[in-house]
Amino acid sequence: MEQVRARSTSPRATLRFLLMGLALLILNVWISLHWLFLRVPGRGRARVARALFRLDRMTRFLTRAIERFYGVVTTIDPFT
């Protein structure tokens, strides 16, 4: 969970709790995607090809999707 949790120095416990819940949701979606799409067929114990979709790749994918939706600030004009 430490890999997807946002860092916050806010004194508001509700914000920190919301960010922790969001991190847990992202982890659960990542695990579900593994079991749905990356299951290795065969007999015996169920296996998942985890190397095909790592957590850092999913977080980069989510970051890019959010940036595309909301836009990215590349410059700040100090005189506005």
Image (tube, rainbow, N blue to C red):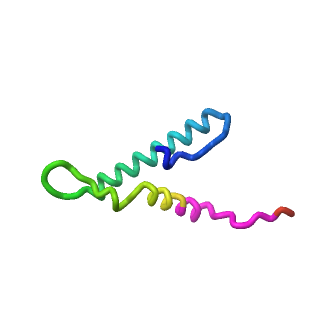
Residue range of the region highlighted in magenta in the rendering: 64-77
* 27 to the left or right of 17: left
Which image quarter is the C terminus in?
bottom right
The answer to which quarter of the image holds residue 11 is: top right
Q: Image point 22% across, 58% down: which residue? A: 40
Residue 71 in picture, x, y percent from top left:
63, 64
Tell me where residue 8 sits by quadrant.
top right
In the depicted structure, whether residue 45 falls above or below residue 71 = above
41 left or right, relative to 77? left
The residue sitting at 33% across, 54% down in the picture is 34
**Number of numbered labels in the structure image:** 0
Assess whether residue 48 is covered by the magenta stretch: no
Q: Is residue 10 above or below residue 49?
A: above
Query: Magenta includes 69?
Result: yes
Front-lying residue, 50 or 80? 50
The image position of residue 20, as x and y in percent, is 52, 40
Q: Is residue 49 left or right of residue 76?
A: left
Residue farthest toward the right in the current orientation of the protein? 79
* Residue at x 23% of width, y 52% of height: 47
